[in-house]
Image (cartoon, rainbow, N blue to C red):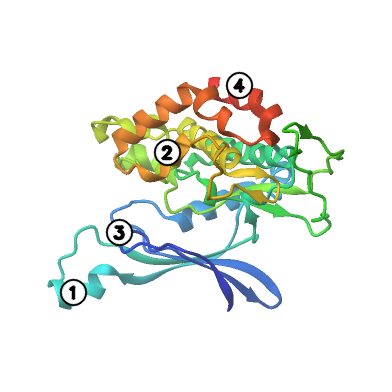
Amino acid sequence: YEVIRPLHNSATVSGRATLVWLVRRRGVYYVLKDSWPLQTKPFSEIQHLITINRAIRSDPEISKLLRHKYPIFVIGEELGDSTELRRKDILGGSVDFPRVHRRVVTKPVGDPLTSFRSKYELCSVLCDVVEYLKYINEECHICHGDISLKNIVIKRGSTSNANIVSQPIIPNESGSTAHTQRTEPSITAHGVAIDYDNSFSIVEIAESRYKINSGTLPFMAVEALNWKDHEKFDHLPQHDLESLFYVLVTVCTYVDAPGYLRNPVPLKTDLSIPANEWWATFDRHTLARVKSSQVGDLDDQILSRLSPYWKDFHPVIRDLQKA
């Protein structure tokens, strides 16, 4: 594979140290991910991707239904490398939480979720993810385990018109808002959930009794953050759906309109953004209380801080919060 450019670099000194590249082979573009998952995990991202791909391709109807909605596994490799081997001369071979080295190649190459072109497209993309998560749970007995903003991408067809963008609601000088006429394009975009380092098999969980409670903190379910005894917590499919709700809230909070990210420097008239605390709170129990409080007071803490573009979308967010 020819490396074209980096797509993601995990800026941490510990953890999985995930690196993602755009690569090319024989004129076709792929995504290559290099990561260091924990050696103690009894699950394999590679095996889960193989299981999902085989299940979908074995059923013509499902294959047609989910054609653009799942990551296509190309090749994966356990490199036979580990942090124990790398550090044996430094630490005498004793390493806490040893990690193994893995590379996975998949396709398609997706666009960031924040590149949605209309509310209609955003909803369609997220519905694709819900449909896919339901399938892999019911038919493959697999949970994703790490639904987050970066782990959902938009796959666009080659015939889609990238110039069709839903126009934002622009305040005029009098303070009122002016709506520009727009036509919703036919959906040529699909949602794909990526990154299966934290995925797990419900069957394997039952057999190994290994407990899963991982994810990306700002998007983790409140119950996952608030557990006291990890032996009593079970990550369930509904926790992935709750994470998806937090993804939607995040998009609405930090995207003013299609093509317009929220200005990181607030205006004097801007209200504060309580959701900022999701990224600044690292104690899980504290974050659980913060999220519960803010989502419980949805209108004041979340909806009132969104841009005018999202005003007609408030009922949708309320209904999802109740669900």
Q: Residues within 10 Å of mark 4 (few under 14, many from 20)?
A: few
Query: Mark 2 or mark 1, which is nearer the start of the sequence?
Result: 1
Q: Compute the Cα span from label 3 to label 2.
A: 23 Å
Q: Answer few, some or many: residues within 10 Å of disc 3's Cα (few below 14, many 20 plus, some between 14 and 19).
A: some
Say which label, 3 or 2, has the lower sequence index.
Answer: 3
Q: Position of residue 293 (x, y in %)?
A: 41, 25
Q: Is residue 129 above or below residue 157?
A: above
* Residue on which the image places disc 2: 220
Q: Residue at x 23, y 32 (%)?
A: 229
Q: Is disc 2 placed on a helix, strand or loop?
A: loop
Report how many numbered discs are placed on residues in the image: 4
Crowding near the residue tagged with mark 1, few <14, some 14–19, many ≥20 C-alpha atoms within 10 Å: few
- Label 1 to label 2: alpha-carbon separation: 35 Å
| Mark 4 residue type | Asp
Position of 288 compared to 194: left or right? left
Residue assigned mark 1? 88
> Residue 94 vs residue 106: left or right?
left
Q: Nearer the viewer, mark 3 or mark 4?
A: 4
Give the SS element for disc 1: helix
Q: Percent position (x, y) of residue 178?
A: 80, 35
Q: Earlier in the sequence, mark 4 or mark 2?
A: 2
Q: Which residue is mark 3?
A: 39
Q: Amino acid at mark 2?
A: Met
Please tell me the numbered disc located at residue 319: 4
Q: Quadrant of residue 119?
A: top right
How far apart are labels 4 and 2 at the CA level?
A: 20 Å
Which secondary structure, mark 4? helix
Mark 4 or mark 1: whose residue is earlier in sequence: 1
Q: Which comes sooner in the sequence, label 1 or label 3?
A: 3
Q: Amino acid at mark 3?
A: Gln
Q: Disc 3 or disc 2, which is closer to the eye? A: 2
Identify which amino acid the numbered label 1 is placed on.
Lys
